[in-house]
Image (spheres, rainbow, N blue to C red):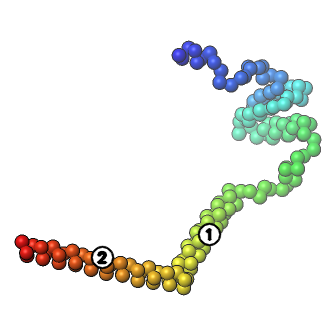
Amino acid sequence: MKEHLRRERKYAFELMDADPYMSFLQLSSNLADSGNQLDALRARPKKFVCVNDDMDDSASTNNRRISAQLQDTLHSFFPTPSRFELHRGQRGYLTIQSWRWFWRVRALAHLVAVVCTFAALYRALMSSRFKQRLAECRAFASRFALCLYAAWCEATSSLETTKSEA
């Protein structure tokens, strides 16, 4: 059975050479190697580019130059900024603190909604119409209990009379 199932494909797919569509760059702190990789990317642009930053932290001068080259390369591919990009010098407004604040406010809003729901339910239960219905139910229950008690007393007394006659 496994042999039979192994031959069947669940999804239709075709293995293709990724080279025409994808490029992988592993930028190191070596200025010449990284420059050659970026020049090759400019010569043959791809639809998908993966850039791996494998730079040494101790070579900060080379790293700044390579970052500038990478930025120039990306600007040559995308000369006009997207409407979603921030302007130069502008910081993003979503930080971890703003997310925490959002979730705290959201939790507080849920708490307020639950409290308001219980307050509305309590108000409905304590309305005069409910109190009147509750009093009617209590009166019915006490009448029903009295009837049950009377029936029980009658049944026990009739049992006692039959025992005493016997």
**In this orientation, does residue 82 appear?**
yes
Task: Please name the amino acid that badge 1 sits on.
Answer: Ala
Task: Please name the amino acid that badge 2 sits on.
Answer: Leu
Residue 119 on image: x %, y %: 57, 76
Residue 62 falls left or right of residue 128: right
Q: Is residue 25 above or below residue 94?
A: above
Residue 136 on image: x %, y %: 45, 82
Residue 90 on image: x %, y %: 84, 56
> Is the Cβ of the residue at disc 1 closer than 8 Å to that at disc 2?
no
Mark 2 neighbour class, 10 Å CA radius: few under 14, some 14 to 19, many 20 or more? few
Q: Nearer the viewer, residue 68 or 104?
A: 104
What residue does disc 1 label?
A: 113
Residue 55 falls left or right of residue 111: right
Q: Is residue 128 above or below residue 45?
A: below
Which-is-in-front pick, marks 1 and 2? 2
Tell me the element at label 2.
helix
C-alpha gap between disc 1 and disc 2: 45 Å
- Snapshot quadrant of residue 58: top right
Q: Is residue 126 above or below residue 73?
A: below
Which is nearer the N-term, disc 1 or disc 2?
1
**In this orientation, does residue 72 appear?**
no
What residue does disc 2 label?
A: 148
